[in-house]
Amino acid sequence: MRTFWLLALLCVAPLTHAAIYKYVDQEGNITYTNIPRAGAKRLELTPLSTIAGGNPQSNPGPANFPRVSKSTQEKRDAMRRELLQHELATEEGKLAAARQALKAGEAVRLGNERNYQKYLDRVQGLKDVVLRHQQNVDALKKQLGE
């Protein structure tokens, strides 16, 4: 029986639309909430699913909104991709250098590192640099869709 009510609730939920209230307190702070309170003004909002049939691509927008031709956009996309690939190559070079520095740093204990913790701190700093460059490479690859 519980399953029936849960199913019924899931079927009815998309048909309802929550009210939003705007409340301005004595200090001028604005609060938006779904809970009505004294002095709050109810905002009438159109659900996104009813705007242009729910398809954002079919919404033409304002008449004076600037438009870009398909060829211009393709040129921009190609330029962006080229820039990202250049950044990726640069970041991969920095990552390789950071890994090499980490490998060399782990192999040597400097003279001022009599305290072993100083050595560990220095090596951890090198590991952090490697991690940061690896995260940058991963983010650039994600941007490029690789």
Image (spheres, rainbow, N blue to C red):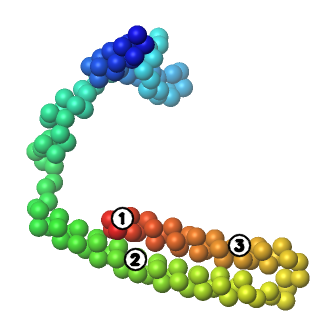
Q: Are marks 1 and 2 in contact (CB under 8 Å)?
A: no
Residue picked out by circle 3? 124
x then y, percent, for residue 21: 40, 20
Residue picked out by circle 1? 143
Nearer mark to the viewer, of 1 and 2: 1
Mark earlier in primary sequence (3, 2): 2
Nearer mark to the viewer, of 3 and 2: 3
Q: Residue at x 68, y 88 (%)?
A: 104
The type of residue carrying mark 2 is Glu
Dot 2 lies on which element? helix
x then y, percent, for residue 91: 46, 78
The N terminus, quarter of image: top left
Residue picked out by circle 2? 87
| 45 or 135, nearer to the observer | 135
Q: Residue at x 23, y 68 (%)?
A: 77
| 43 or 137, nearer to the observer | 137
Question: How far apart are the two marked residues, 3 and 1, measured between alpha carbons?
Answer: 28 Å
Instruction: Please tell me how crowded label 2 is: few (under 14), some (14-19), or many (20+) other residues with Cα within 10 Å.
Output: some
**Does residue 47 sit above or below 62 in this rendering?**
above
Write down the quadrant of residue 19 in the picture. top left
The C terminus, quarter of image: bottom left
Dot 1 lies on which element? helix
The type of residue carrying mark 3 is Gln
Instruction: Please tell me how crowded label 3 is: few (under 14), some (14-19), or many (20+) other residues with Cα within 10 Å.
Output: some
Q: Are marks 3 and 2 in contact (CB under 8 Å)?
A: no
